[in-house]
Image (cartoon, rainbow, N blue to C red):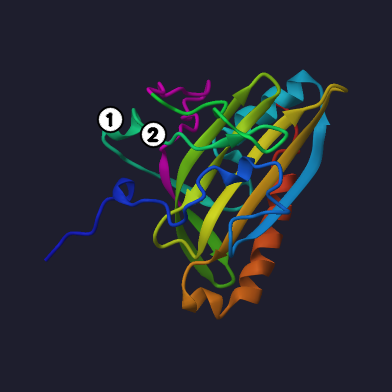
Amino acid sequence: MNQPAELWQHPVTYAAVGATQAVDLLRYPPDGYRPIERRARIGHGDERFEYASLAVMTWGVQRNSGFTVTMADAPAEVTEMTYTPVAFDDSGEPIQPASTGIAHEQAFAADGTAIVSPGDSAIMGIPFGPLHVKAPVRVVYVVDEPKRRGFAYGTLKGHPENGEESWVVEQKDDGSVWIVVRAFSRPANPAWWAVYPVLRIAQEFYTRRYLAALAGPID
């Protein structure tokens, strides 16, 4: 009997890897996918930006929204050569992404929590009514700029949806700090299509949680 493949061996379940970076995502999403974009102000100043950006880069949005995050192991040769998705400039032209993850060295926060790296795979544990749904994902790109930090993950086999979602913390010129959530998705199979209205309600519910997840106090 064939053994099930390790999580790192599964490809993502959609083709448009990196498309959450497209300026015109809401107008021209990947064919057959529903796009969303939400943003919220979460504070002001450099200290807030550093706090929020570190939190987003250590899965703080997901954990503070009620998810469990279980990281999956992968061979070193896999994590050293990871995704190089297409990125886009303000006019929609493809450019080199801010961080591709090629030969990316694993970094850690002061408390020892690993910083997100492109190619990381994880299983999200998502409360869904009386159930706790397992949702496998892979980090497909990381944004690491002076005033913009975050990442996106794509869905793997077993996730209730197909698509991609990103969480980016931005600091504007006036010092205000914002979180921006962008995604495109569709149900992964007929069973999830059958409960699509419920799935959309759940997505909106957790998106609201994402927007509030990093607005807590600075220690």
For image coordinates 41% across by 24% down, the residue present is 106
Q: Could you tell me which quadrant the N terminus lies in?
A: bottom left
The circle drawn on residue 82 is 2
Q: Percent from the top left, x then y, of residue 143?
A: 59, 30
Residue range in magenta is: 103-123
Q: Position of residue 121 (x, y in %)?
A: 40, 44
- Residue 156, position as x, y percentages in the image: 42, 55
Which of disc 1 and disc 2 is earlier in sequence?
1
Residue underneath mark 1: 76
Please identify the dominant SS of the magenta region.
loop
Task: Tell whether position 120 is magenta.
Answer: yes
Task: Assess disc 2: are there few (<14), some (14-19) or many (≥20) residues with their C-alpha within 10 Å of its C-alpha.
Answer: many
Question: Could you tell whether 218 is left or right of 9 in the image?
Answer: right
- Secondary element at image label 2: loop
Tell me the number on the disc at residue 180. none
With respect to residue 16, does 198 lie above or below?
below
Q: Residue at x 47, y 25 (%)?
A: 112
Which corner quadrant holds the C terminus?
Answer: top right
Q: Amino acid at mark 2?
A: Thr
For badge 1, the amino acid type reads Ala
Q: Quadrant of residue 187?
A: bottom right
Alpha carbons under labels 2 and 1: distance apart = 11 Å
Secondary structure found at label 1: helix
Residue at image position (47%, 56%) is: 14
- Residue 30 position within the rendered picture, expressed as x and y whole percent measured from the top left: 59, 56
Going 52% across and 26% down the picture, which residue do you hit? 99
